[in-house]
Image (cartoon, coloured by chain):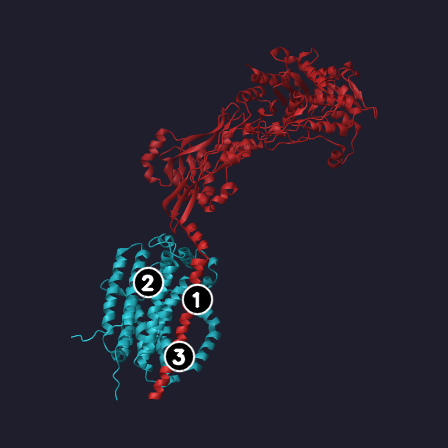
Amino acid sequence: MIKKIYLDPYIFIGISLLAMVGVLILFSASEGDTTIVFKQSIYVVLGLILFLFVSQPDPDIYRRFSPLILFGTLVLVFIAYFFGPEINGARRWIRLFGFSFQPSELLKISLPLFLASFLFDKKLPINAKQTAISIFFILACFLSVYIQPDLGTGLLIAASGFLVLFLAGLSWVFIGITIAAILIFSPFIWNNLLEPFQRDRIWTLFNPESDPYGSGWNIIQSKIAIGSGGFFGKGYGEGSQTHLNFLPETQTDFIFSVLAEEFGFIGVLLLLFLYALVLLRTFYLAVNARDRFCRLVIGGFIFTFGFNVMINLAMVIGLIPVVGMPLPFFSRGGTSLLSIFLMFGIITSMSTHKKFIPK
Amino acid sequence: MDFHERQLERQSFTQRSLLVASLLLIFIVVILFRTFSLQISNFTEFDKASLDNRTYSVPVQPLRGKILDRNGEVISENIATFDLVTTPRDVKDVDEFLEKIEKIIDLDKDEIDLYIKNFNSKAFFNRELVLKKNLSEIEIARFEVRGFEHKEAFVGKRFRRVSRYDEIFSHVLGYTGSARENNLDEQNRFRSNSWRDAVFSYANGLIEGKAGLEKTYNQSLTGTFGIKQFEVDARGRLVKELSYTPPINGENILTTLDIDAQKVAANQLGKRKGSIVVVDVETGGIVAIYSYPTFSVNKMANGISQLDYEDLINDPDKPFFDRSVAGRYPPASTIKPLVGIHALNRGQISWTTKIDDPGFFELPEDGRIFRSWGEIAHGLINLNQALIRSSNTYFFNLAYNSGINELADDFEKFGFGSTVCVDCILEDGGLVPRPQWKMNNLNFGWFKGDTVNIGVGQGYISATPIQLAHYTAALANKGTKKPLFLNNSLSGKIPSSEIELENFNQRDWRLLHKAMESVVESDYGTARRIRDQKDFLIAAKTGTGEIISLDSREEYERIREDQGLRDHAIIVAFAPAEKPKYAVSVIIENGESGGSVAGPVALNTLKELLKE
């Protein structure tokens, strides 16, 4: 017997619209490949079901099970790394019944959940020991993904962890010291920790014309696609940059360029409006959440999501280096889509359940 | 946590969230601004870049215009053949490829050598390369049957640039050869790499005029390339044809040349080194212009073996050298009418002034002797007689009593010392010497004897056959000078000019023409040998160009053993004498006698032109 369905209409409508527009753009980006679009649509439907399902339980369940969830996710990540197939030089997938599954995407959910459940009852500001423990988990999660290798996802996971830590009340002294240290050691990082192709990407960003057919190609073609869209766009399915293959990775990282080419500035405004709607609503929900745990989780989730979107956009319009980061709701990929629905499901659960306050 | 702490925590969370949110907001604003800049501010630039990306324009070669003679008869044209065309970029191993092809189609050694020689350069540009021209029907059939095995070769209809007269028009016509795309005026219309995919009409791919009329009028002969515009994808694969603008074939050029006259001229000169130039006196159009030795234009344009080419280049008689426009010869006695005009105009003499010709001229300053041809004494003679008999002494006298600068001024008025043809190629201006020239070039002062020599067209003066024809036409036109030309469309467009001779009137011109007629008609005339072979009157002046200066007849008999040192035979003439239509100059190197050797050549060519 279901007495009540827990649902936030703004979020539900916002993400449903985004997912639908996403499928529409993917249809064009994949040259009308019905197999890809059908598969993606299935994921959208599955995602909505998952979303509704995880919205229903009381958030305390997530708090209690968060260590187990994180542990489970990490196990899956390592299974993928040690036993999964190698695709394009990376081992991040698990194959099951013909479906590929990318467990590292789930870390964006399980890591903030775990950190929030660890920090929700700690005194302000977070002390050194708690900070160290948090950073240990963040680094562990980051490294587990970084070695696959998948820098983009790894950074996003680390960001989700740090965001929770920051929102929970990380000491400003610690933040100041860290920023100073990063500034001092950045030349060392540039020279020793970055792979040559990563350095190339950063270098190319500032000077794409230096290698128009090599590492500069993607950025140049993406800018041409977006720029030539103009105000109204070239029309759905009419983007020459997209359909004549000048634009790379149209179904994944550069799908925003497809939208911008075919729907122009109007399309970009509409897209940003939808994202802003979802972001503003969840921001409101975070601030008004029923307890600290929910606040931290919703905050960690939504800011990670926001940065994910902004980094992808900034990347394809040539503001930051290409790091391999899909656009939520748009880029092809089932795990990413499901994890986003999962995330919004948890957010809905946390914002719709009233807290029973013991006397 | 107590209530107060919870309040603090919530406050802290809200503040920190706002901080992160404002970071995101800044991000959004920057992204919006940047997208606006790409899509709105710089739309035009990116729109063009996207168009450039997806379209690819390929040039389509036009056919060259024909070169026609003045009657519209074809001299040079394009002939279609079926050729075995290959695409070098698809050929991996030349030897292996040729071996395969040879099983189906016979290839001779020249064809293989030429192919291998051109293979690398063509493969670099990814152009077509014709392996065998002019396939027979059997060869085509045999290839088509097995064609599927050779994707790097196909049978294509290709044109060749061919002159119907392989050797007689060589110098004036010129020939075509391979063009590099960066030589073309068209280069700006196409991206440089699009030339490798050009649609060719010619077996030789891109061609351009390398010499003669083919070069002078290359641009209008070439025409305008057509454009095939394709939509391409990022890999450069052609998706579909978007548009086709057909090429505009080159314009035909109607020349002033006359095929029949040229044939006769070439035939008359035969295998003797020299030149013949015939000019239409009324217009200045060049009717015939021939220089021997010559070469095959069709071989030059369509493939000449390395050996043949080296033979041509190394031939001591220089077949590529166009004697008609660039050969420098002493004008010799053909200059005498001009020296006569000069002296009459200055009032130095009249038609009745008689001068004694003892067979030689003694320079009063130092007693140096200037001998006449054959050292014949003509006695007391006037200008008329001096011209008919070609007395040297008479003209030594006239030159002696004038000055070098005065003589040079009048020579230049008649076109000597400068080019006379507006659309000839590599034309030489000859030389009208002046004291300053001698000082600059020979580092020697001018002697009176130098002036005396120039009175008979010897010494430092030199002229080209085309200058002599131009000068003769001016004589025929009684002082109206017309620049020469080859393109009939220039007819009437080049202004002619009257040569300024204050004291030389119509009567003088009539007498001069009469004297030149008598060169042929008189019993004493130096060209009397051709007198009885015609039914119209010719006015002429012969000349014998000395290659080395000698003092006596005996000495000449000695050096004569060496054919290369024999005198040049020269004649200039115009006809019909009463109402001149054509002027001609003939030079036969080492031909010795202007009248009896060069004379018949001039006569027979004029006969062909004047026949009813």
Mark 3 packing: few (<14 Cα in 10 Å), some, or many (20+)?
some
Q: Amino acid at mark 2?
A: Ser
Q: Chain of mark 3?
A: B
The disc at residue A331 is 2
Horizontal and vertical percent position of residue A196 = 44, 64
Quarter holding the N terminus of chain A? bottom left
Tell me the quarter of the picture where residue A327 sits. bottom left
Mark 2 packing: few (<14 Cα in 10 Å), some, or many (20+)?
many
**Looking at the image, which is closer to me, B6 or A346?**
B6
Q: Amino acid at mark 1?
A: Val
Query: Element under label 3?
Result: helix
Q: Residue at x 31, y 67 (%)?
A: A92
**Looking at the image, which is closer to me, B523 or B569?**
B523
Q: Chain of mark 1?
A: B
Horizontal and vertical percent position of residue B535 = 60, 11
B214 w.r.t. A91: above or below: above
Q: Amino acid at mark 3?
A: Gln
Residue picked out by circle 3 = B15
Left or right: B471, with B89 as reference point: right
B438 w.r.t. B229: above or below: above
Camera sees residue A103? no
Horizontal and vertical percent position of residue B271 = 57, 22
Closer to the observer: label 2 or label 3? 3
